[in-house]
Image (tube, grey):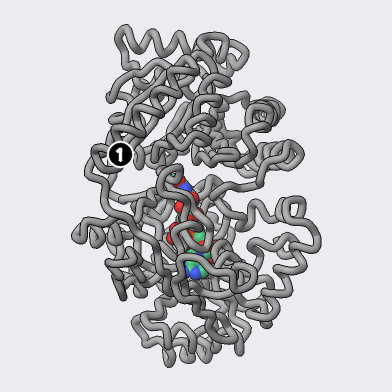
């Protein structure tokens, strides 16, 4: 059995899937039956291969280069055993998991290195630049866009730079409510430490249990409560980035007019410019109260109007997610069980036969929203009353606390389900965008339609669901989940066809190619349509300045290298 802790001393994830290796099955017989009736499942479940069967390329790191790494970091901080190389060979996107489960990663780092001080990190980058060793910064390894894939951009060796040993809390400025941490600190540890001081960061992506704050900053991540607490870009007030030519250190400031936002050029740079090794983050008083509840709307349009009103009339909940009709039907079906509610759920889903996509979606058009409020008693009471009032004005019916509590309790569990679905030959994938309120419903239909069409063209009609979340005064994010039978032997081509169709629909439809998953390898072709040729060239110039040898995370973010 693989070690429970990685070389950095942090809990290790399943190398072939999500989360705690000791976690039991997440797929219950009811859900499996529902999927068998709708999209179809494999007749025989298929487990991931054993660790020893993973095809690992021979290491390209020669003895001399290895010895030089050891001289800078110490022997214990340079690892090239099978488990470490496999664990750092991929992120946690659909394609990553398909490849890892089959034991056929696209590549593997030639070594994994674990610097523990800023000085060693700087020396390491200098060494790698002088020897042409590619460096992939590795936080929690939860990227879903190929961000940590160990590409070299050439024949040279590539090392994964694990940030797990740079995870200290270096300063807490209680008066200003700013915490400064090593970028390798994971979300739960930071929240635990802040809780002792009655504080919270309020950043809970669905991948929270394994993300590092450096990885979140490098990807412009958004947590589930971003409507209230803001996304990570709003929380990062200062940072330090080590680059192959030296450091950029930006002290935490509440705001600044000192030229274009340097901080914003680094937040979202995805390891292509350097390694963020320290971040200063805004924190808040931990909420005295949390109240999560459900509201049902007659239609998606009514729910969208209500959310827009909340965002524009200063009545924003911390968490706001409005499921479209398809996602609402699915959650009701899954919540239903085998009894009367289960029958109700199946009726809603219209599940009558395998691939009977035409019948799915003929039932209710009602849409459920989860609203979560966090704050001090009086403030929360007043804000909630205004929010619920706006929901009611748009026809919303309050469902009470039960749907909210259920969502809160299960919010980090879905990724385990994905592993079980893959075992049963079912593809489940997510993608996201954001757009203006005035374009939101049009884009919702266009992207959903493109995904449906692409799945059908692959001969695997599926379920396409979406929710609106991450509210802003001017717009919101659309987050799609799609489920379909895998095409055995063609899983990646099938995925690519759907991804391409969705990406095109997003760009043509006026959305951003990514609201919070970042660009990585998968979205690189769509960066230029979004920021323009000059925009890409300007970023390229910055990269050449900071990383003249081109060693930092090759093949990511920049379209030409993708
Ligand atoms: C099941 C699941 C759910 C998810 N839910 C969300 C969600 O709700 N919201 C969201 O925003 N994202 C989500 N993600 C995506 C992912 O968790 C985020 O992109 C996260 O911010 C990555 O953090 P990480 O520490 O795992 O970074 P990694 O995956 O290790 O790295 C991500 C990218 O950042 C670079 N990088 C990492 N650390 C550094 C550093 N210190 N300096 C410079 N570059 C660095 C890497 O090279 C890579 O390009 C989800 C992913 C999964 C698998």
- On the image, the x and y values in percent for residue 263 come to 55, 68
Q: Nearer the viewer, residue 72 or 529?
A: 529
Q: Where is residue 201, by image quadrant?
A: bottom left
Q: Is residue 467 left or right of residue 434?
A: left
- The single residue placed furthest to the left in the displayed view is 196
- On the image, the x and y values in percent for residue 521 come to 63, 57
Is residue 423 at least partly visible in the picture?
no
- On the image, the x and y values in percent for residue 310 come to 48, 32
Residue found at x 55% / y 26% = 304
Q: Nearer the viewer, residue 524 or 445?
A: 445
Q: Quadrant of the C terminus?
A: bottom right
Classify mark 1: helix, strand or loop: helix
Numbered label tally: 1
Q: Nearer the viewer, residue 341 or 180?
A: 180
* Residue at the disc numbered 1: 379
Q: Is residue 157 above or below residue 523?
A: below
Q: Is residue 348 left or right of residue 440?
A: left
Residue found at x 54% / y 80% = 248
Q: Is residue 47 above or below residue 253?
A: above
Residue found at x 48% / y 57% = 234
- On the image, the x and y values in percent for residue 81 come to 40, 72
Q: Nearer the viewer, residue 253 or 556?
A: 253
Is residue 337 at least partly visible in the picture?
yes
Q: Is residue 288 above or below residue 271?
A: above
Q: Is residue 522 left or right of residue 368?
A: right
Residue found at x 40% / y 36% = 317
Q: Quadrant of the N terminus?
A: bottom left
Q: Crowding at label 1, few (<14), some or many (≥20) Cα neighbours within 10 Å? A: few
- The single residue placed furthest to the right in the displayed view is 533
């Amino acid at each position: 059995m693989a070690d429970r802790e990685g070389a950095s001393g942090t809990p290790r994830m399943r190398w072939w899937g999500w989360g705690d290796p000791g976690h039991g099955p997440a797929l219950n017989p009811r859900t499996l039956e529902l999927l068998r009736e709708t999209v179809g499942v494999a007749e025989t479940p298929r487990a991931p291969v054993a660790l020893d069967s993973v095809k690992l390329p021979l290491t390209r790191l020669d003895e001399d280069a290895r010895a030089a790494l050891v001289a800078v970091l110490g022997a214990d901080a340079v690892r090239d055993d099978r488990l470490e190389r496999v664990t750092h060979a991929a992120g946690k996107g659909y394609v990553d998991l398909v490849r890892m489960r089959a034991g056929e990663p696209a590549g593997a780092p030639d070594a994994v290195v674990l610097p523990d001080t800023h000085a060693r990190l700087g020396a390491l980058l200098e060494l790698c630049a002088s020897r042409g060793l590619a460096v992939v910064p590795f936080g929690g390894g939860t990227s879903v866009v190929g961000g940590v894939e160990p590409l070299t951009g050439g024949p040279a060796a590539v090392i994964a730079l694990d940030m797990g040993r740079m995870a200290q809390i270096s300063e807490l400025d209680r008066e200003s409510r700013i915490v400064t941490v090593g970028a390798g600190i994971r979300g739960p540890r930071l929240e635990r430490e802040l809780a002792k001081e009655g504080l919270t960061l309020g950043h809970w992506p669905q991948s929270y249990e394994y993300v590092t704050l450096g990885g979140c900053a490098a990807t412009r991540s958004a947590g589930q409560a971003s409507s209230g607490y803001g996304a990570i870009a709003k929380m990062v007030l200062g940072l330090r980035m080590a680059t192959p030519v030296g450091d950029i250190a930006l002290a935490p400031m509440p705001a600044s007019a000192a030229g274009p936002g340097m901080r914003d050029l680094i937040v979202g740079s995805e390891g292509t410019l350097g390694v963020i090794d320290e971040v200063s983050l805004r924190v808040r008083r931990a909420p005295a109260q949390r109240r999560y509840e459900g509201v049902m709307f007659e239609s998606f349009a009514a729910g969208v109007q209500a959310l827009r009103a909340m965002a524009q009339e200063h009545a924003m909940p911390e968490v706001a997610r409005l499921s479209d009709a398809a996602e609402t039907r699915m959650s009701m079906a899954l919540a239903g069980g085998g009894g009367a509610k289960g029958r109700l759920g199946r009726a809603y889903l219209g599940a009558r036969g395998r691939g009977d996509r035409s019948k799915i979606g003929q039932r209710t058009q009602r849409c459920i929203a989860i609203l979560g409020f966090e704050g001090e008693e009086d403030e929360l009471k007043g804000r909630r009353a205004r929010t619920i009032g706006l929901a009611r004005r748009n026809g919303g019916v309050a469902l009470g606390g039960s749907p909210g509590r259920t969502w809160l309790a299960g919010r980090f569990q879905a990724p385990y389900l994905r592993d079980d679905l893959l075992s049963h030959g079912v593809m489940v994938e997510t993608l996201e965008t954001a757009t203006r309120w005035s374009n939101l419903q049009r884009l919702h239909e266009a992207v959903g339609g493109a995904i449906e069409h692409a799945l059908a063209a692959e001969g695997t009609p599926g379920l396409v669901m979406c929710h609106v979340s991450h509210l802003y005064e001017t717009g919101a994010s659309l987050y799609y989940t799609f489920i379909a039978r895998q095409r055995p032997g063609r899983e990646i081509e099938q995925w690519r066809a759907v991804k391409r169709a969705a990406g095109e629909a997003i760009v043509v439809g006026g959305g951003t190619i990514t609201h919070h998953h970042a660009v990585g390898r998968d979205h690189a072709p769509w960066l230029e349509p979004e920021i323009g040729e000059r925009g890409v060239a300007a970023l390229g110039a910055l990269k050449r300045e900071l990383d003249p040898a081109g060693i930092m995370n090759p093949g990511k973010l920049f379209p030409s290298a993708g």
